[in-house]
């Protein structure tokens, strides 16, 4: 991996301004993040959001925020939130890169249950876990909250953000588990993001009351905004 390769995974058809960063965890592992835009701009994820959420969702403590050059964004929030510095590495830093791709060796429900323990929910105490399917395996996510509520990411978006950052753009489906809700249901924001990436795929819901139901992603968002007319680059083919 190098900076150019990582940057090429950014999805910025609306602004044309790709960004990327790395967060080094205490273990030394590097958690990458790229800018992932959405046709509805408040639902876009910044490189920093994805990298920090990815690190925390793995149960790791962030230690350094790394950029290739001077950051275009303002990293002050992240520096204060985690009491860390940002560093500029013109050359891609050495060290192992976090690989979010895993194989599901146990039933999805069991895995989602275990994953739930990794959610970071100091504000809501409402953990959610998600598993996104890609061609060669699955990518997991949990919800992560920060001291600023609107910078956190839902479990679904952590899984999708990790997947896009790792270079995947085709999804086979998504499942979520919400133990504290009798009926698990993706929030409005996630519905918009899920539809951007996998409107034709199935979303499985593991409800807190032990039942399961599944729906086509597109049925979660009737009368959806058509983002295709906004796009400058080609649509993700699975969307
Ligand atoms: N949450 C998710 O992770 N996914 C959803 O679809 C619904 C909401 C999280 C976000 C926040 O951490 C908490 O649940 C309460 O909104």
Image (cartoon, helix red, strand yellow):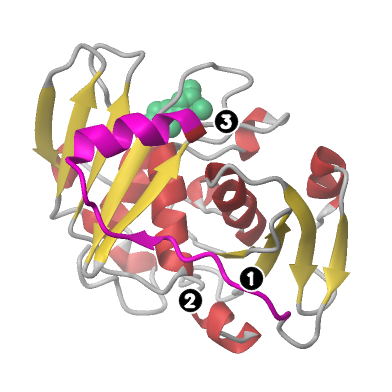
Looking at this view, is 67 or 226 the one in front? 67
Residue 173 among those drawn in magenta: no
Q: Is 120 placed left or right of 126 in the picture?
A: right
Disc on the earlier residue, 3 or 2: 2
Element marked by disc 2 = loop
Residue, disc 3: 120
Residue interval drawn in magenta: 93-117
Q: CA distance from mark 1 to mark 2?
A: 9 Å
Q: Which residue is mark 1?
A: 20
**Residue 54 sits above or below residue 13 on the image:** above
Quarter of the picture for ligand 1? top left
Left or right of residue 38: residue 212: left
Q: Quadrant of residue 191?
A: top left
Q: Which residue is mark 2?
A: 9
10 Å neighbourhood of mark 3: few (<14), some, or many (≥20)? many
Image-based side of 175 in relation to 54, left or right: left
Which quadrant of the structure image shows residue 65?
Answer: bottom right
């Amino acid at each position: 991996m190098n900076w150019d390769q990582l940057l090429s995974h950014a999805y910025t058809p609306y602004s044309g301004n790709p960004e990327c960063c790395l967060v080094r965890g205490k273990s030394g592992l590097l958690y990458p993040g790229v800018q992932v835009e959405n046709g509805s701009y408040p639902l876009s994820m910044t490189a920093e959001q994805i990298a920090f959420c990815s690190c925390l969702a793995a149960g790791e403590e962030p230690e350094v925020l790394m950029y290739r050059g001077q950051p275009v964004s303002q990293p002050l929030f992240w520096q204060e939130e985690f009491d860390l510095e940002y560093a500029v590495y013109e050359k891609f830093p050495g060290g192992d890169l976090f690989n979010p791709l895993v194989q599901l060796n146990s039933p999805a429900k069991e895995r989602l249950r275990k994953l739930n323990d990794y959610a970071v929910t100091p504000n809501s105490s409402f953990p959610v876990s998600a598993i996104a399917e890609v061609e060669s395996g699955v990518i997991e996510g949990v919800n992560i909250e920060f001291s600023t509520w609107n910078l956190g990411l839902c479990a679904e978006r952590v899984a999708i953000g990790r997947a896009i950052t790792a270079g995947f753009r085709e999804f086979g489906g998504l499942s979520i588990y919400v133990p504290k809700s009798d009926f698990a249901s993706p929030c409005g924001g996630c519905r918009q993001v899920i539809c951007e990436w996998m409107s034709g795929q199935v979303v499985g819901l593991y409800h807190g009351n032990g039942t399961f139901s599944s729906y086509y992603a597109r049925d979660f968002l009737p009368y959806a905004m058509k983002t295709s007319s906004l796009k400058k680059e080609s649509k993700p083919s699975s969307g």
